[in-house]
Amino acid sequence: MRNIINISLPIPLTKVVDREVKSGRFASKSEFFRNLLRMWMEGRLSVDLERSRDELRKGKGKFLKTLSDLR
């Protein structure tokens, strides 16, 4: 199932989106924004992983041998 989300962009940003779609890099404006959201989500994951690594380096983390160790 899909939901429709409408956004309002200033003209300069609209031109960027249009240019990217016309270049063939994206099939549609929707695909442009789906890709942008995926990239944002990947960036968030990277930040979370780096925070976890920092916690492990500082001795605040716990290495788990099995999933049952989570409980």
Image (cartoon, rainbow, N blue to C red):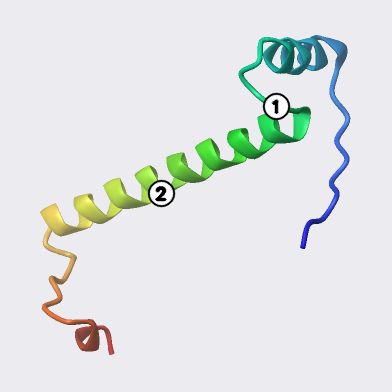
Q: Is residue 47 above or below residue 17?
A: below
Q: Residue at x 22, y 89 (%)?
A: 68
Image quarter where the C terminus lies is bottom left
Q: For mark 1, what is the residue?
A: 27
Q: Is 67 on the left-hand or right-hand side of 47?
A: left
Q: Is 1 on the left-hand or right-hand side of 54?
A: right
Q: For mark 2, what is the residue?
A: 45
Q: Residue at x 78, y 57 (%)?
A: 2
Image quarter where the N terminus lies is bottom right
Q: Is residue 46 above or below residue 56?
A: above
Return the mark for residue 52.
Answer: none
At label 1, the amino acid type is Ala
Q: Quadrant of residue 15?
A: top right
Residue 51 pos. (x, y %): 30, 50
Residue 21 pos. (x, y %): 72, 18
**CA–CA distance between discs 2 and 1?**
26 Å
Residue 19 pos. (x, y %): 73, 9
At label 2, the amino acid type is Leu
Relative to the observer, which residue lies in front, 21 or 63?
21
Q: Secondary structure at mark 2?
A: helix
Relative to the observer, which residue lies in front, 62 or 43?
43
Q: Is residue 54 above or below residue 61?
A: above
Q: Residue at x 88, y 40 (%)?
A: 6
Q: Residue at x 78, y 14 (%)?
A: 18
